[in-house]
Image (spheres, grey):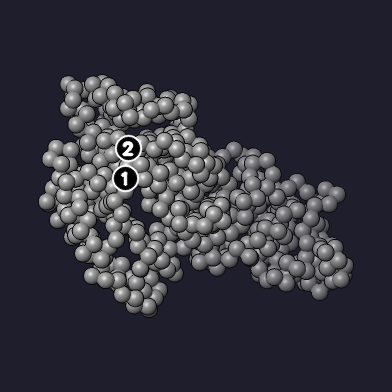
Amino acid sequence: MSFKKRRGDRDGAFSGNTASRAIIDIGSNTVRLVIYGGTMRAPTVLLNEKVTAKLGRDVASTGRMGDDAVALAMRGLERFVLLLEDLDVTDIETVATAATRDASNGPAFVASLERLGLTPRVLSGEEEAVLSAHGVAGAFPGAQGLVADLGGGSLELVNLDKSDVSDPVTLPIGALRLPDYRAKGDGSDAAMRTALEKALNKGVGARAAEATLYLVGGTWRSMAVFAMQSAGHPLSDPHGFELDAKSAKALSKALASESPEDLKTRKRISAMRSEKLPDAAVLLQAMLGVLKPSRIVFSSWGLREGLLFDRLASQGQAQDPLLAGVSTFASQRGAPPTLAARIASWTLDAAPARKFGSERLRLAATMLSLASMQIEPNIRLPQAINWALQKRWLAIEGAERAMLAAAISANGNQLDLDERMRALASDAALEEAIKWGLATRLARRLGALSRRSLDMSRLVIEDQALVLRLATSHAALYCGPVEKDMKLLSAQLGLIPRVDIVADEALRMAKD
């Protein structure tokens, strides 16, 4: 089957996003299709579909992928190929990992993929490790530490120093193979941990102690979900969730004692992950003992995102992933970056990023605040606040998410903040973000976001007063709602509101 171009078949698909790139990831546990749109620096996932084929289930014992597993995988892949053809997606990368590379019938399976029209690339364990590390580097700019990608058939470890990777290794310790390590002893957690520590010590070589350990893979993410739920954490996305070594040890101990049956009752933990989590918790105990990390960080970016990141030019890789993602998202909702930049510039003197925030965060808050105005008023604030708190943004911490949410809330004139924000950030940090939101509110309501209104006005702090300078030609803008917004922002800043009407030419000269 070949991929034919059929322009126009997907008009309007995916809520304004264009499906531009796809990755088919053939793992030992699942076969997955992910279709991406938006900016590839912070791509939007338009479709994420998997088939739990368990190709690696029998490889360790028989040396082959089971015929039933291969048949199930091929059924899913035939569907994926047809979807991609109908969606006119031609930029497709197909990669296969441990099960395909280790199985004696791997070459025959690859030939079947080629007959479907795919061009599969069977990754070595070292290549898999490097790609996962590149995914982490893309999600956490400047990251330093050790990346551990747990798949169905293998565990990849690689050192990461910003964008440089070194010493990649692959070990036969995948989620599907963990029961084999339990079987090597008396079946107890202690004996299993000893067997895993032996395997880790034999394979990992010298690794820096007290480093950050970045955990990649669906089993680890489910572990993070368990930890977040147990702690009553206010966020839902496991990406970026972190624990110090002591807390990670407590988590691994608690999770190892859970039964799969009890785990299945938890929301957002699948039956498949429930079966693997207790054994994975014992693996984490072994890794904590051998690698001795100072903290662990869960990453939702790994191999697939590493493939995307690798294809970016150097200037694309250098982009801020938070601003890249927010700008695309906000643009699709009527708030282009140029408009947000004008508003952020206009409000800079009165409400800059100070002690707790940053200008990148303030710009992101401005974009999301402006985009929120396209939501129907009766659902606006809850939905926009959830954008800030729950959507998967990159390179942002919990306290920064709370500041985004506080700015959005203040932009909507809601100063009684959600308790989730107060659980994530200090009162002082939230107060700073409230000023951003109130300043954005004033800017957009002054002249209905017209460029002319911003050009013919200026907002400054002068002599303990918040001063709005308006050109004579635009003096009529100051009344009613604008006056109220000036008072709100002034009170938040602890200043007296003042309006100066100046000649048009004088204002233009002052701006120049």
- Amino acid at circle 1: Ser
Nearest the viewer among 27 and 190 is 27
Residue 363, horizontal then vertical, whole percent? 62, 55
- Residue shown at 67%/65% (left/top)? 445
**Residue 490 in sight in this render:** yes
Residue 425, horizontal then vertical, whole percent? 56, 40
**Residue 235 in sight in this render:** no
Q: Circle 1 — which element?
A: loop
Seen in the image, is 405 located left or right of residue 307? right
Quadrant where the C terminus sits is bottom right
Residue 43, horizontal then vertical, whole percent? 45, 58
Q: Is residue 391 above or below residue 3?
A: above
- Residue shown at 28%/57% (left/top)? 120
Disc 2 packing (10 Å; few <14; some 14–19; many ≥20): many
Seen in the image, is 206 located left or right of residue 277? right
Disc 1 to disc 2, C-alpha distance:
9 Å
User: Who comes first in sequence, dot 1 or dot 2?
Assistant: 1
- Residue shown at 19%/45% (left/top)? 103
Seen in the image, is 467 located left or right of residue 86? right
Report the residue marked by disc 1. Answer: 124
In the rendered structure, are the residues bearing label 1 and label 2 in contact, judged by CB atoms less than 8 Å apart? yes
Nearest the viewer among 367 and 422 is 367
Quadrant where the N terminus sits is bottom left
Q: Is residue 187 above or below residue 102?
A: above
- Amino acid at circle 2: Thr
Residue 395, horizontal then vertical, whole percent? 52, 46
Nearest the viewer among 448 and 219 is 219
Q: Circle 2 — which element?
A: strand
The disc at residue 170 is 2
